[in-house]
Amino acid sequence: MNIEELPVSAIMRKDTHTVTPSTTLWQVIELMRQTNHHILPVVDDDQTLLGIVNYRGILNIFRPFSKSVSEIVERMPFVEKIDDEDLNLQLSPEMGTLILVADIINTNYITIEANKTVREVRRLMRLHGVETIPVVSGKKLAGILSLLDILVYIFKEYDILQK
């Protein structure tokens, strides 16, 4: 079968790690660290997809000002360029337990239905500049699909990786 016509459900990861709105920042970071996933779907008790949380969203809450403000400031000729602002974060120990996923959830995300094709998911990935997309069946989380998952499937088909 042509991979472009393959349904997303055939190659998506169904064993997706998820978090809930009440998950603490510490728990999110630990889960990301343990699983090496930089995006986690946020679901309710019924597995309805509510949003996503990713490392960029986490970094943004600790910046002293928004990314758009820093870009404007950097364009001013009389202001020194700011060093790597991802390293200059305003932190306190309490944040790990006081900040919840509900505080940092991204509800502006794209999804794809499990019955859509790999061609359609690649088009969405390119259009939105993302490499990972939650897969849904209705409003329920069915899995997650990344560009790496697509590449692994292709490599297995050409016997580069073991099936």
Image (tube, helix red, strand yellow):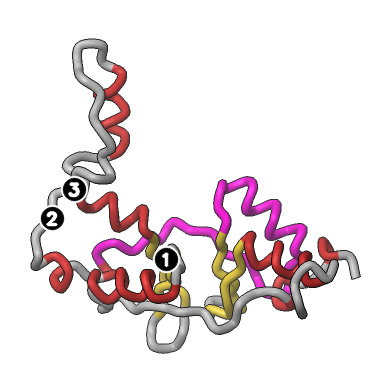
Is 5 positioned to the left or the right of 51 in the image?
Answer: right
Q: Which residue is drawn at the image coordinates 79% and 67% (left, top)?
A: 160
Image-quadrant location for residue 7: bottom right
Foreground of the two, 86 or 132: 86
Q: Amino acid at mark 1?
A: Ile
Position of the N terminus by quadrant = bottom right
Q: Which residues are magenta?
A: 103-131
62, 93: nearer the viewer: 93
- Where is 23 relative to 103, above or below? below
* Left or right for 53, reference 76: right
Which mark identifies residue 52? 1
Q: Nearer the viewer, residue 138 or 119?
A: 119
**Distance from label 2 to label 3 (Cα)?**
6 Å
Q: What amino acid is found at the position of numbered circle 2 in the picture?
A: Leu
Rendered residue at 57%/56% (across/down): 131
Q: Residue 89 — which label?
A: 3
Across and down, in percent, residue 155 comes to: 77, 66
Check disc 2 and report the residue beneath it.
91
Q: Earlier in the sequence, mark 1 or mark 3?
A: 1
Q: Mark 2–mark 3 contact, CB under 8 Å? A: yes
Asked if marks 1 and 3 touch (Cβ < 8 Å), the reply is no
Above or below, 39 against 79 in this view is: below
